[in-house]
Amino acid sequence: MITKYPDSSDVKVMILDKMHFKDARDYFKKRGIFLITNNNTAIADFGCRFLLGHNDYEEMRVKTFDLHNFKKMSTIKLKSSKEFLSLKDDFMTKNGVVIDPKSGLIYHVNYVARDKDNEKDKDKLVFSVEYKAKKGGNIELLRDDERTFDFIIESNEDGNLVTINHEKSGDYNKVLEVFDAVSKGVTENTTDSIPFIINKITLDNLSLPEKIELFDKLLNYKFEKCELRCKLENVVEIKIRKNKKTDLPQEMNDESESEELEEDLPDQDLRDINEALIKGDNLRTNALVNRLIKNKYYFYMVAIKLAHIKDPINVTIRITFNSNPEFLEVKVINSAEIVNEEESSLILSPTEQNQYIKKITEVLWEIYNSFNTGKNATDVNFKEDKIIKTPRKRGKKSQIIDTKNEPLKQM
Amino acid sequence: MAESQVVKGNDWLDKAIRLFEALGWEQHGSNNVDIKIPWGDHEKGIDAYFVYYDPFEETKIGIFLEAKNYQMESVTPSFLEKTIKKMVKVIDEVPASKEFNEKLNFNQANLINTGVIVLWVNDKFEIDTYRRYLENIKIPIKRNPQKIFLISNDDILRFCSIIETCKIIQQKTNSNNGEQDLISFHYPSLSERSNTIESLNTLTLEYLFSKYIFIKTTEPEEIEMGNSRINTSINILIVLYFDDVKLNNLNLLYNFIIRYQLSDVAKVLVYLYQGDTIANRETLDEFQRLNKKRKNNYFENGSISKLLKFEFDYMQQFKDYFMRASK
């Protein structure tokens, strides 16, 4: 709520320094004012001459300070033999009920039926989750951080898609807690079997060559042929991790053997990989990659820059297989518009960003599922899923506490 | 184009010209002038060309006007894009042509980078659809900056309202400037402006698209002194107010008036563009209550300000006026 009328020189600075070129132009475009120029200075010059109203300045303020409005998302699949509407009833049982008194975890769910006019639309359950987490504070030593985020379950025969719009990585675990509570609630009162199981993309279920192949297939995917109409311009960043997989129960692992090393791929190697991709090579045949495999390294994160074929826009998206907690995150980390052969920072609308994130997620599921035809090994009963309770210590193996105090079963 | 279309088009052009003349703009040259562009070896048709003094540029500026009169279904995003692109080309190419100076500009040193497209939708104007189109139009990029204003039904009706309200103000106050037809508008000295011209009979495009328009004027007042009555006048500030009638918005106006030192008046008369509704009346009452408290709490520049009296009135709204006229 602005109470002091902004000085025109302040407005000029706002537009010039704190608004992106496209946002500034769009701000005036929707008011019927078209500023035909190639730089923010001209827009700032003209823009500060209007005596705008309260809501106009609020809108300007929101457009500027929201600089880090980059979207991110993680997805898992909810597999069930039940009908979607029946699942809805299951989730309604704990709607608005405090699930965990300690954290105040609570959710509110809405059923949204599909739009009959739109073939592609699906039935959805939209969840809004609230909980409290403890956080170090400035005034109190430990204060409650009230967190909220939402997630959506979309009906799908192939496994209902759960899209989590997490703010913090801790949110992911809360989704699992919600599923756990609902499932317990359903089985407690009836003789029904577990209503659903969770299916997620995890590198842990892949062999080492398959881990590499997943990235290989992703980087060689023909994005230009899909509805995004963009191509992979280059790999901006790629990170490797040493394979620590053992089949022994957790207690028997020697700590020194199972150090998890995460490294950034050095620039020269990154260039090698980019070259290989441009040539259209398979990553697996690449000498560098083979060296990595021999030393039991695999990729766990990659950031790719996708450039639109027609419009002068590019988007950089980071795909990370987090280990603490263990989930796949797809995030937009940058986007730019090419103006006069120079990159000018640009924030895409949430809808546009989500399009990119959704497509990449789709592609990853496609690739992942192709590894597991016939095997049911990808289904993980979320009750036995790892929920990391203590913070990771660098260089040491994370403390993993199983909810049932059993070693993780390799299914 | 069919004969009747041409007539209808010209009819609308005449009305549009009269609209802007009523806002203080000067038309230079005639309507519908064709200007030869020598290097492209073609001609560009200019509906009308206007000039006014711009207090920011500190010079007179030239404005190309294009008048359009269409049905809503013809107003598509591509139509709007095409029209704007055409205007961009006009601003780019016409000023350099000799014929332009001979027929329209008369060799004056006007700064020419502005275009106005006056689009009247002559059946049902769908404002939401139109606003959506505006957001999605792609516009070209040029090194030499241009400003193009796309004015449509709600803007046009707002301008009509401004003109009518100014007439009423002139009748009620001492604002008749002898020969001049139009009232004097007050241009606050914003810090981005170096010159000091504060009063003009013209409404610039920036002012037309602002949420406040200020008029500094006087109002006659009768004072009783003993047995006789003396006719005097008091200074008043008139605000044509287009923002929402909400407390935050009104408070921001109040803050503007204080900061730009417009408060040394007997009263502020605010003409609201938004209508007389119950919600608005409640907000105005609340604002007046707040205002009374302000007198005691307000320190600005070290001096205690006196109570700034506010009065509210409503601008005349035109909904169908033009619809009837343009058919």
Image (spheres, coloured by chain):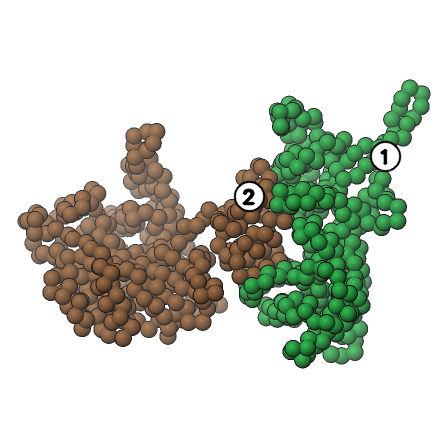
Evaluate whether residue B226 shows in this view: yes
Q: Secondary structure at mark 2?
A: helix
**Amino acid of disc 1:** Pro
Name above or below for residue A32 compared with residue B247: below
Marks 1 & 2 on one chain: no
Q: Is A268 in front, or is B324?
A: A268
Of tags 1 and 2, the one toward the viewer is 2
Q: Position of residue B19 (x, y in %)?
A: 78, 58
Q: Secondary structure at mark 1?
A: strand
Residue visible at 65% across and 24% down? B303
Q: Which residue is mark 1?
A: B220
Near mark 2 (Cα within 10 A), the count class, few <14, some 14-19 or many ≥20, is some
Evaluate whether residue B71 shows in this view: no
Q: Disc 1 to disc 2, how far (Cα)?
A: 39 Å
Q: Colour of chain B?
A: green
Q: Position of residue A4 (x, y in %)?
A: 58, 37
Question: Residue A111 falls in which quadrant of the image?
Answer: bottom left
Left or right: A99, with A203 as reference point = right
Residue visible at 91% across and 19% down? B226
Left or right: A179, with B72 as reference point = left
**Amino acid of disc 2:** Asp
Dot 2: chain letter: A
Q: Which residue is mark 2?
A: A10
In the figure, the brown chain has which letter? A
